[in-house]
Amino acid sequence: MVDTNPTSPGHVLGVLRAAGPLTRQELQERVGVSRATMVERLDVLRRAGLLRRVGHRESSGGRRAELLAVNDTGHTALVADLGQSHATLAVVDLRGTVFARADHELSPHDSPQETLSRLVETGKSLITDSGKAETLCAVGLSVPGQIDHDEGVTAAPWSMREWDGVRLRDPFKEAFDVPVLLENDANALAMAEYYAMGRPEATMVGVKVGTGIGAGVVIAGRPHRGETGAAGEIGHMRIEGGDRRCVCGRRGCVAAEASGRALVRMLRSKGARSVNDVVRWVEEGRAEAVDAVSAAGRLVGTVLATVVTIVNPRYVRLGGAIGVLPPFVEALRRTVEANAHTSALRKLDIAASQLGDRGVLVGMSGLVADEMLSPARVDAQGFR
């Protein structure tokens, strides 16, 4: 049974994560234990490689007290962002520092098994080349769509039907023999914004608009997944007057009109062949692309206004190739402000993500850190 003692080594580490760096005396006072007990707890954490010295507290007289912090730089993880047409892998420490990275375009002709095998081999190369094999403690994998976290399988988005039911955890577990964490990509993006803002005590909604549309909700520092993992599936909320068939088989979904895939379809007669074309045209100021992206922002904003009214978040952050484009952001903001409940708008902060294509990787590294440095994990089995 896991030790739930609030003075256990894992809980001591939790206090240090939340409030550190701290001196031994400061940590002892916060935890509420004797000096001898604190010495024993710190010895356990030091032997597990979970503590580091980060300087000294200025003294008013006598010796300066040593400052201790969590060793979030001495352990590494392999994190991956698996999208509908791309995959990015990186070796990071538990603070999110990237030591090695690889980007792949994915072929629609490759099976899930072929793609996963390729990712595993790329991960092995990155870990070897970065010299971090001895410090690898976990793998974190972000994917579109819903996830069965107990079984480690996907309930993939409709545009990736061949991925439905694929066992994601197994090939990485077999290859690296470390815990494998899975998360929805929109949840990972929302968590990245939460970490980047210094873990505010506030509710956050992250909206990712790229090839598809998804959202993540962060409540009390954790992703809210819902009862069946479907929380945040705003791309398949129906909009009034919409009749276009969506990839999910229904008609009128916002994704059918406002996703990157939908924008490429709308602009195909002008020569657009990919989401990258749409992004480039907006950056060049081409009127047809700017107008289409603004219209998409208004549609997503209509749906998001309902989410804002129900959830009442402090922050909304927009990500994805389409989601960060200025015409999209501005149209969405105006629509939310015009349609959400007045009280829900009072403290609302809507902005584009500033993390760029690092967003999901930042989110996954933070989620790995939260899991691997959690009191329960530390007390149950320590650290590899």
Image (tube, grey):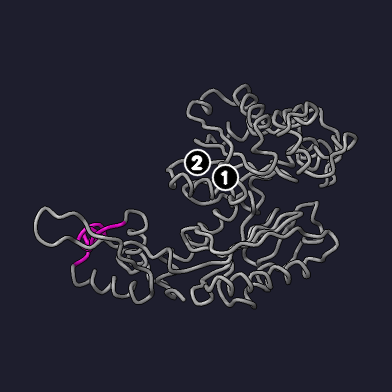
> Residue 154's image quarter?
bottom right
Q: Is residue 249 left or right of residue 56?
A: right
Q: Which residues are magenta?
A: 21-34
Amino acid on which disc 1 is placed: Val
Instruction: Say which label, 2 or 1, has the lower sequence index.
Output: 2
Disc 1: CA contacts within 10 A as few (<14), some (14-19) or many (>=20): many
Residue 254 disc label: none
Q: Residue at x 42, y 43 (%)?
A: 201
Residue 203 disc label: 2
Magenta segment: does it hold 265?
Answer: no
Magenta segment: does it hold 24?
Answer: yes
Q: Residue furthest left?
A: 61
Q: Residue at x 74, y 45 (%)?
A: 212
> Residue 161's image quarter?
bottom right
Circle count: 2
Would you say the residues marked 2 and 1 are in contact, meaning their CB atoms lie under 8 Å apart? yes
Seen from the viewer's position, the closer of residues 224 and 193 is 193
| Mark 1 lies on residue | 217
Q: In this picture, is 152 found above or below 324?
A: below
Q: Is residue 72 left or right of residue 141?
A: left
SS under mark 1: strand
Amino acid on which disc 2 is placed: Thr
Q: Residue furthest front?
A: 284
